[in-house]
Image (cartoon, rainbow, N blue to C red):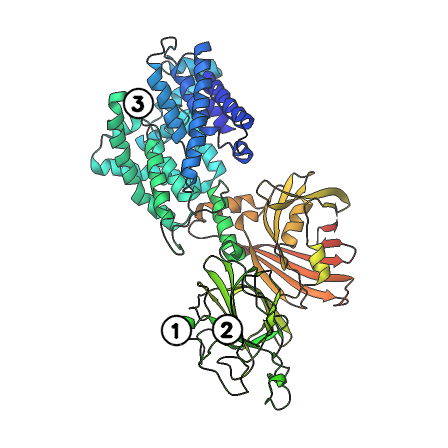
Amino acid sequence: MLLLLVSFIDVYAGLAGLISVFTSNILAKILGFNRINILKGAYGFNSLLVGLGIGLTYTPGLETLIVVIIASITTLLITIALEGILGKYYLPFLSIPFILGIWIILLAGRDLSALGLSQRGIYTTNEIYQLGGRKLTDFYIWIQNFDKPFFIKTYFLSLGAIFFQYNIIAGILIAAGLLYHSRISFILSLLGFATAFVFYKILGVNITQYGYTYIGFNYILTAIAIGGIFLVPNKYSFLSILFLLPIVVLITLSTSRLLAPYQLPVYSLPFNIIVLLFLYFLKLRTGKHKYLIEIVTQLNSPEKNLYFYNQAKSRFKWLEFFPVSLPFMGEWTVSQGEEGEYTHQGDWRYAWDFVILNNKGEQYSGSGNKLTDYYCYEKNVISPAAGVVVEINDGIDDNKIGNVNLIQNWGNSIVIKHTEYLYSQISHLKKGTFKVKKGDRIKKGDILAKCGNSGRSPFPHLHFQLQATPYVGSKTIDYPVDHYVKRLNNDFELHQYSKPKENETVSNIKTTELLKRVLNFIPGKKLKCTMNDIEETWTVNTDLLNNTYIYSEKTNSYAYLYNDGFIHYFKSFSGNKNSALFFFFIALYQVPAGFYKDMTVIDKLPPDITSNKPVKIINDFFAPFYSLINVDYIIKFKDINNELMPDYITMETQITERFLNKNINNLRFEITVEESGKITVKSNSVKLEVKL
């Protein structure tokens, strides 16, 4: 709203911008272009800037109106073309369409005699008086005459120039809006501007020209774009600004000289050049990136980008790793882990051997001299993930107990391709037990073969490894298992995107039908909700990007979720933090679909989930370097009345919010899931019932 106000400081310019936006968006919709981009404003913002520029440059009239409409259509054409060209390299078109569009009009305008140059802006005081009367005029004169540092004055003028407003009031309004919208963006704007300002001083560039031309917004926009929009805000993105801004200064000076003979303003050209070059430069990197991290899910706010990245880094590992499970059913124990004592060494160190043990820690019954004495022998082996069978070695006999086959080292084996450069290999299988053949497309959990004792295997066990190439015996890669439960005596621990260690007893999550059914929020469902005797209805929907969410029309709140069949996750929330949906969101933030008594699941809620706004605002300023807020989430399984056919399951959630490591808020919820499909969430102040 502040930006809208700024654009209408000059009413004719504001109207021209409004007409441009409507023209571009209506045309884009008629021609059938991407609806998501239209709704996001991607096809309109460059036209808006062109419209503002034309509205300020030329006198109002029918001729100017015609030029505004033609210019907005031209800008849309350039926008769509650049989207196609730069989109191939996953690069944004930024404000290049605006620059090209306004340059076309300025150059052509010299031959359009019907267009008259506007005199507005020369008598600014009179215009301010017409806009807001004597009081606003006095305030404007006071601001103009206020004895303020040149740096601050030029900073505000540069901000105002983004919307073609060359006065301090516009800059102050934009700065206020920027600070309200994003504390990180505000800090970055000051950092970018200050860096360029100091560089001007060091090089001896005429600093008055810096203020006169209002080109400082190039440095502000570059700092915000690199520091917080296209890269995850952190100390490295901030540091990169200190190196990039001097380059932007040089580009600004050189392009200004280059365009001077044509009497064309440089506008935001330096910002576009350096941001596109730097983003393209980063895309040519290989391997994992720890420092300058590109944004994958763009939330259009540095704070949201940062908090979502930190959340995704620990919670949503499927964004980084294709989910691969353990290749068996039931509980198995790691007899040899990574960097093993016998065979898992060198290029083959990332692998696991699994056996089944009884309660005494023994692998077999009886004497252990026969293959059939071993608990894992002839047990089904399953596919760890969906894929295509690319290799099968079969026909190798099982060894007698204590013997090994060093010539056919891997024994009967299968290799499955899951994605490019990700294959799984399972070895030491029993001859003739394969249920699949080479070329078969298989699903996660499909039976592949039976465990045997072939190859370099003195006793029945299962060898499992992940690799980048499709051959039996390929070098292993360091890669985690998506979810598994570790058991120690009668205690259970849930591990996510981790790696089992030697002597650990592990299993895939064994789902409980009641939890799996109740936590499966299928799009199209309607949920009846009652909180403290107040009723409302929720709906489960998907957005244009196929993200599932629960929506409360009464409170206009959204809770986004993800369910991989084994764990229910709530991903993000927007809306009223005093609503029933918000309490439902935090109480069931992460819930495994399998009941394990007394198992505790630990997670973290994002810092911006806090309802304490002053604390959140303070944290935003420090967040790129250190989060002052930590919100711990713990859910514990309490009781089940019947493990085979339960009528109810109870759980307990504990949420602890800490500021500077001091507890500032604690929430505790008791959760009951019933066979009827009802979920009850209770706390000291809330009783929430949700019926499926």
Mark 1 closeness class: few <14, some 14–19, many ≥20 residues within 10 Å: few
Residue 40 in percent (x, y) is at 52, 34
Residue 86 visible here: yes
* Amino acid type shown at disc 2: Trp
Q: Do residues under tags 2 and 3 come within 8 Å of each other at their CB atoms? A: no
Q: Which residue is mark 1?
A: 346
Question: Any mark on residue 352, and which?
Answer: 2
Sequence-first disc among 2 and 1: 1
Q: Residue drawn 47% across and 40% down?
A: 182
Q: Residue drawn 43% across and 68% down?
A: 474
Residue 651, by quadrant, is bottom right
Across the whole image, how many numbered discs are drawn on residues?
3
Sequence-first disc among 1 and 3: 3
Q: Which residue is mark 3?
A: 264
Side of 267 relative to 404 (left or right): left
Q: Is residue 151 above or below residue 55?
A: below
